[in-house]
Image (spheres, grey):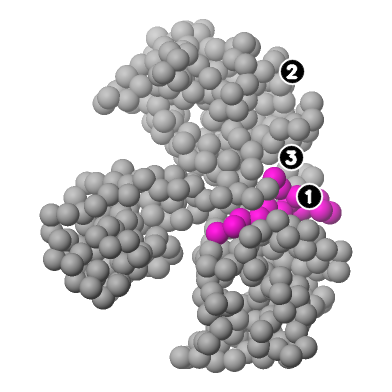
Amino acid sequence: MKKITAFLSALVLLTSMFSLCASAGEYLYGDVDMNGKIDILDVITLNKAILGKESLSKEASALADVDGDGMPTSTDALQIMKYIVGLITEFENSAVIQPEIIQDAKIYNNHRYQLFDIGMTWTEAKAYCENLGGHLMTISSPEETDTVLNIFSQSSKQLLWLGGYYDEEASGWKWVDDSEFDYTNWDDYAPDRQTRNDQTESYMMTYKKPNPNGSNSEAYKWNDIFEDGCFPGEEDFFSTENYCFICEWDDIEDSYIEYNTHRYQLFEQSMTWTEAKAYCENLGGHLMTVSSAEETDTVLEIFSKSQKLLLWLGGYYDEETSGWKWVDDSEFDYTNWDDYAPDRQTRNDQTEAYMMTYKKPNPSSGISHSEAYKWNDIFENGCFPGEEDFFSTENYCFICEWDS
């Protein structure tokens, strides 16, 4: 967190007088609407300003400039969104906290479930899961309800978002994954679809304790609620901060393989090395590490299924120890470097410090004996000057690994 002091001093005094800011005199970069937190509304506000539908104050413009280039742009909006969903853990202009993962993923009926103990609205939680390649948890049977109870019991929160919503066009309830809505577990009087300020209760949740508004309410039954999770007069119970959520990934049996008590899964999303590392860690795993020739064969088996030419690996150069390390701190005693690698080239004050591999030999000039599937070092964004058709961030995939 940084203090914006030069031109915010008058505003700081004004907001502290009216208690508009949780921490008097301080503002977070990325908090475009200046409400004391960084969330999806900041992205929406910034995008509206970029499209000319709204104007930003001088102060809000400064807070929106998370990359520090002096101007709020779509690049800043993308960076804020990446922070919200956990793909980056800091901005150029701030220090932020990575979202907390409560437990390792649970597996049921070839689906993976992961609890996130983060207070969000239903829309934000839905976007969070989808940006991780999954969706908000859906429930199709009493047995899957038991899975919910088992995972939800690990949370410190009292309320849990579920992946159900009311579809106005179809005039009925639906699941976010479009699965059949033929099993229900509604609480007493629910759903009642109450309205408030032109909003209607259209989003599904459940609770650890009975609904204080219902005389025959039962814990862990479903209810409908407004998008922010709040209910007038019951803010101590129905508050956005009291919610957690569970992300679900479908049909994982076909999407991962196991080797030596470890699980590996391929992700086709194009990311930098740092983003891919954060992505895996948010799923309770880590970027794949390679400790033997046999594990190299595992890499080849998974990588061969990708449409991409390049693959991030979980190795990086540690400046403090002046040597290469794995992200899981396992021994770095097996190597598979390509010809001339690692050479740790520099460019614009950056150094090749991140490990990758390729399906085709390295096309760079001067590399005459390159081999496919050998390791190389590259810049954090995966690019190399003059070879952008090959070494481009868009050409990368990555594998997440979960240990025994």
Could you tell me which residue is drawn at 62 percent across and 45 percent down? 283
| Amino acid at dot 1 | Ile
Could you tell me which residue is drawn at 59 percent across and 57 percent down? 117
Q: Secondary structure at mark 2?
A: helix
Q: How far across and down, in percent of the image, does residue 222 sit?
A: 72, 77
User: Which of pointers 3 and 1 lies earlier in the amino acid sequence?
Assistant: 1
Q: Residue furthest right?
A: 143
Could you tell me which residue is drawn at 57 percent across and 68 percent down? 242
Q: Nearer the viewer, residue 218 or 261?
A: 218
| Amino acid at dot 3 | Tyr
CA gap, disc 2 and disc 3: 17 Å
Q: Nearer the viewer, residue 385 or 259?
A: 259
Question: Magenta includes 112?
Answer: yes
Q: Nearer the viewer, residue 381 or 31?
A: 31
Q: Counting other residues with Cα less than 10 Å from the Cα at mark 2, is it few (<14), some (14-19), or many (20 or more)?
A: few
Image quadrant where residue 266 sits: top right
Q: How far across and down, in percent of the image, does residue 111 sit?
A: 77, 53
Read off the magenta span: 104-118
Nearer to us of marks 1 and 2 is: 1
The residue where tag 1 is placed is 107
CA gap, disc 3 and disc 1: 12 Å
